[in-house]
Amino acid sequence: MNEIRANLRIVKIETYSLIRTGFLISVSIAVTIFTANILMFIVLAGMGVFESIDQVLGDLTGGSAGLTETLSFPVVFLLSLAIGLFEIVVTTTLFAVFGYIYNATVPLTRGLEVTLAEDVEGDKG
């Protein structure tokens, strides 16, 4: 079996493409985080975990703890949304910074070398 190889060197990454890719990846991560937060809140609220914590804190402090009033569904929804938006901004910015740093260091490092290979079967006839 013969093998065809091609050695390629990545000497420039288009920053705009990297930003678009980073944005799409960060949006998918944000949707996952948002969905997980909402589902976790619904499950924990349905199991009565927050009421139990309120009761324990009330017994310890001698007063009434307001965890269930503070941690309502709209608060969790908005907090999850804010965390997701923050994650989108930070991740997209990090992708852009990575692109600038990579393009700035290519003259020193000569880029990233990638080897592509393909197995080719010879003629059997």
Image (spheres, helix red, strand yellow):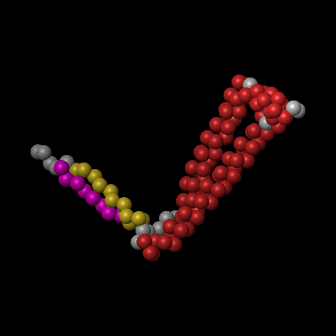
> From where the camera sits, is residue 25 visible?
yes
Q: Is residue 91 left or right of residue 57?
A: left
User: What range of the chain is rendered magenta?
Assistant: 1-8
| Residue that sits furthest to the bottom in the current view | 107
Quarter where residue 110 is shown? bottom left
| Residue that sits furthest to the top in the current view | 47
User: Which sits in the foreground, 33 or 123?
Assistant: 33
Residue 53 in percent (x, y) is at 76, 31
Q: Is residue 107 left or right of residue 61?
A: left
Q: Residue at x 79, y 36 (%)?
A: 71
Q: Is residue 111 left or right of residue 80?
A: left
Q: Is residue 12 above or below residue 66?
A: below
Residue 118 in percent (x, y) is at 28, 52
Q: Is residue 16 above or below residue 87?
A: below
User: Which sits in the foreground, 39 or 124?
Assistant: 39
| Residue that sits furthest to the right in the current view | 63
User: Which sits in the foreground, 56 or 44?
Assistant: 56
Q: Is residue 19 above or below residue 1?
A: below
Q: Quadrant of the C terminus?
A: top left
Majority secondary structure of magenta residues = strand
Q: Residue at x 75, y 39 (%)?
A: 77
Residue 35 in percent (x, y) is at 65, 37
Q: Tell me, yes or no, whether the highlighted magenta stretch contains residue 14.
A: no
Q: Residue at x 79, y 39 (%)?
A: 75
Quarter where residue 42 is shown? top right
> From where the camera sits, is residue 65 visible?
no
Q: Tell me, yes or no, whether the highlighted magenta stretch contains residue 2.
A: yes
Q: Is residue 116 left or right of residue 56?
A: left
